[in-house]
Amino acid sequence: LYTNGYQDGFDHGRIHGLIEGRAIGREKGFQMWEEVGFYEGTALFWKAICETQDGSKERVIIHINHLLELISQFPVVNPSTQGSLATQDVDVAKLLSQIRTRYKMFCSSVGIRPRLRAA
């Protein structure tokens, strides 16, 4: 009787944990991509400005290109158990931290105040 009740509770908790985990993961993923998308849009905007101006903005372009390179490495799909090993080895927290750091360096080189809203 105890074992049956325990197993029923365990199975019920597993199902609800999976549902709740997916919902939280979807929400957090959206928040991270909102932040990364803002950084990408800002970088592309300033890259277009720097390319049209005659002044030497070499340092700014280097920061922009490195920021865009880091953003291109950010996963766009949720790795599953069937996913490739290369996709699963990405440390999303570390990569996001690197993107934020490069974004701050880019803002400093352009002379704008960074919008820092952590996901």
Image (cartoon, rainbow, N blue to C red):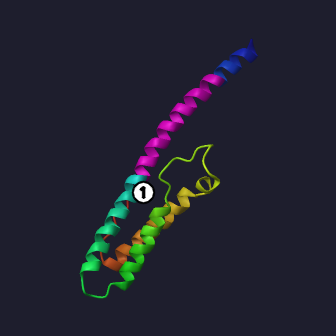
Q: Main secondary structure of the magenta part?
A: helix
The quadrant of the rendering that contains the N terminus is top right
Residue at the location (62% across, 51% down)? Answer: 84
The kind of residue on which mark 1 rests is Ala
Along the horizontal axis of the image, is 106 left or right of 2? left
Q: Which residue, given by chain and number where applicable, does mark 1 sit on?
A: 118
Give whichever of 57, 5 is nearer the camera. 57
Provide the residue span drawn in magenta. 11-32
Give whichever of 6, 42 is nearer the camera. 42
> Where 88 sits versus 112, above or below?
above
Q: Residues within 10 Å of mark 1 (few under 14, many from 20)?
A: few
Q: Residue 25: where, in percent of width, then height?
A: 49, 42
Q: Residue 16: where, in percent of width, then height?
A: 55, 28
> Where 46 sits versus 11, above or below?
below
Provide the secondary structure element on which disc 1 rests. Answer: loop
Which image quadrant is residue 114 in?
bottom left
Along the horizontal axis of the image, is 83 left or right of 44? right
Residue at the location (50% across, 62% down)? Answer: 73
**Residue at the outermost top position:** 1
- Whether residue 14 is in magenta: the answer is yes
Q: Residue 63: where, in percent of width, then height?
A: 41, 76
- Whether residue 58 is in magenta: the answer is no
Q: How many marks?
A: 1
Residue at the location (62% across, 43% down)? Answer: 82
